[in-house]
Image (cartoon, rainbow, N blue to C red):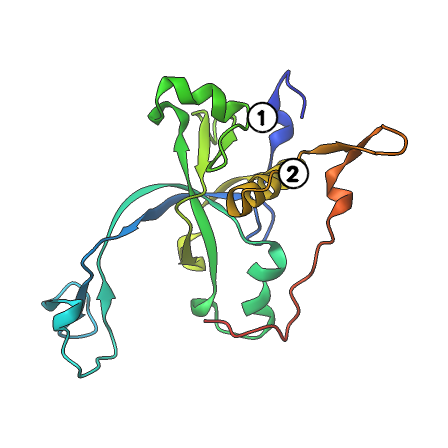
Amino acid sequence: MDSRDPAEEWYASPGGDLSQGDIVRLIPFGLIDAPLTICRPHNADPRGKANYYPLDQLPTKQRTIQYLHANFKFALGIVLWPDCQIDKLKNQGHPEKKWFAAVAPVIPLSELAAELRDRVRSFDRAQWFPLPAKLPELPDESYVDLRFVWTLRYSLLSDRIITLSEGAKQALRLHKFWFDTEVRVRAQVECPHCHKPVESSVLFQYKDFGEDEGSEE
């Protein structure tokens, strides 16, 4: 990436379909609290009355609708799944209301302690992936918090404001690999024979998720 203006090479305009690296407005993220609390509405309208139960006191009779309470906030979010996985449910003919994808929150860098911000900017914290500001879509320098990954329905991911460039997507993939495995892959490695830099992406074989792999939900 060009250090003179990282935002220019870091972002692109969103495509026609939901894609890895898309940044969307107003997604929920948070934690499932303990002890678990189950909510069972009296009818299909969640705005009406409901019964609340601790998990160990939940009646055995099953209902068609029940909800799990969580502590959450709203923020920008970024789509994490590769495009082949995002498109899998659609390609298998499932109705759009069943489609879902994994996202993580995008949070202003200013919410971190001052002593951490430079470490995030230099890609030195596995759990936080840096995002430069880009006016007007992303006015604040931000970061992706890879600790909070949620699956959401497509209908919650329609307000896409910007997406990552191909180079930035690759950087995100490598950063998430580091977070998930504690094994860090540098963007470039030195060839042991000629000692020239080689892009680390050539060391990976990218696999397209086949149509026959696993169940949907």
Q: Is residue 47 left or right of 5 when viewed as pictured?
A: left
The residue type indicated by label 1 comes to: Ala
Whether residue 158 is visible to the viewer of this picture, yes or no, is: no
In the picture, the disc for residue 7 is: 1
The residue type indicated by label 2 comes to: Val
SS of the residue under disc 1: helix
Q: Residue furthest front?
A: 192
Q: Residues within 10 Å of mark 1 (few under 14, many from 20)?
A: many
Q: Is residue 104 left or right of 85 when viewed as pictured?
A: left
Q: Residue at x 60, y 23 (%)?
A: 6
In the picture, the disc for residue 185 is: 2
Q: Residue at x 84, y 34 (%)?
A: 192
Q: Nearer the viewer, mark 2 or mark 1?
A: 2
Reply above or below: 2 against 184. above
In the foreground, 159 or 63? 63
SS of the residue under disc 2: loop
